[in-house]
Image (spheres, grey):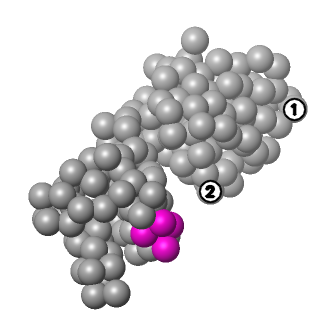
Amino acid sequence: MKIKTQRINAIIRLIEKNRVGSQEELLALLEKEGFSTTQATLSRDLKALKVAKQPGNDGGYIYVLPDETVEVEKENLREDFPLGGILSLEFSGNMAVVKTRPGFANGIASVIDGQGCYEILGTIAGDDTILLICREGISVEEVLRSLDMFIPGIEDKVL
């Protein structure tokens, strides 16, 4: 049991100090620390620790510990977020489709919903696409003006 505790502590330390993106990467780091373990054991350890994968700044994913999630989210809210995650915006009637970098759609949709804009009824997000539903009778320009208040430069993404 002592070895398991040491391994768990090593996993926590490695995730806190490194930007680990895969189990293979974490296994290699554990190996350097002197821990020989299998991928299945590591997977169980990660599940027990409630480790999650979260989008990193480089477009990939990194492992985060439950209490670390908020800090990584703050790091992602740099000046270019959420605009840096948006690839395009296209309107059709009272709806718009927002294409994002993989893993960014939910975060960006949450930012949009959190603003409580009158012009936007709500969003539905997948991994890399957001369906933006606008109020009837609201012009594209009004929606863009509203979005530009908290996503400066959004008009440059319109197709």
Q: Residues within 10 Å of mark 1 (few under 14, many from 20)?
A: few
Q: Main secondary structure of the magenta part?
A: helix
Residue at the image position 58 percent from the left and 12 percent from the top: 159
Direction from residue 102 to residue 130 in the image, left or right: right
Along the line of sight, the residue nearer the viewer: 54 or 154: 54
Residue of label 1: 136
Question: Which residues fall within the magenta stretch?
Answer: 44-48
Q: Residue furthest bottom?
A: 2
Kind of residue at disc 1: Glu
How far across and down, in percent of the image, does residue 117 sit?
68, 48
Q: From the viewer's perspective, is residue 80 above or below residue 153?
A: below
- Disc 2 is placed on an element classified as helix
Confirm whether residue 42 shows in the render. Answer: yes
Amino acid type, callout 2: Gly
**Is-magenta flag for residue 26?**
no
Rendered view: 72 above or below 151: below
Q: How many angstroms separate mark 1 from mark 2 (CA)?
A: 20 Å
Query: Would residue 86 be seen by someone viewing this image from the given angle?
Result: no
Asked if the residue at tag 2 contacts the one at tag 1, i.e. Cβ–Cβ closer than 8 Å, the answer is: no
Q: Position of residue 94 (x, y in %)?
A: 81, 26
Is residue 45 positioned above or below 131 on the image? below
Quarter of the image where one finds residue 83: top left
| Image position, residue 115 (x, y; %) | 61, 54
Most distant residue in the top direction: 159
Residue 75 badge = none
Q: Is 159 on the left-hand or right-hand side of 81?
A: right
The first of marks 1 and 2 along the sequence is: 2
Q: Between 42 and 77, which is closer to the camera in this rendering?
A: 42
| Residue at point 31%, 83% (across, down) | 5
Q: Nearer the viewer, mark 1 or mark 2?
A: 2
Residue designated by label 2:
114
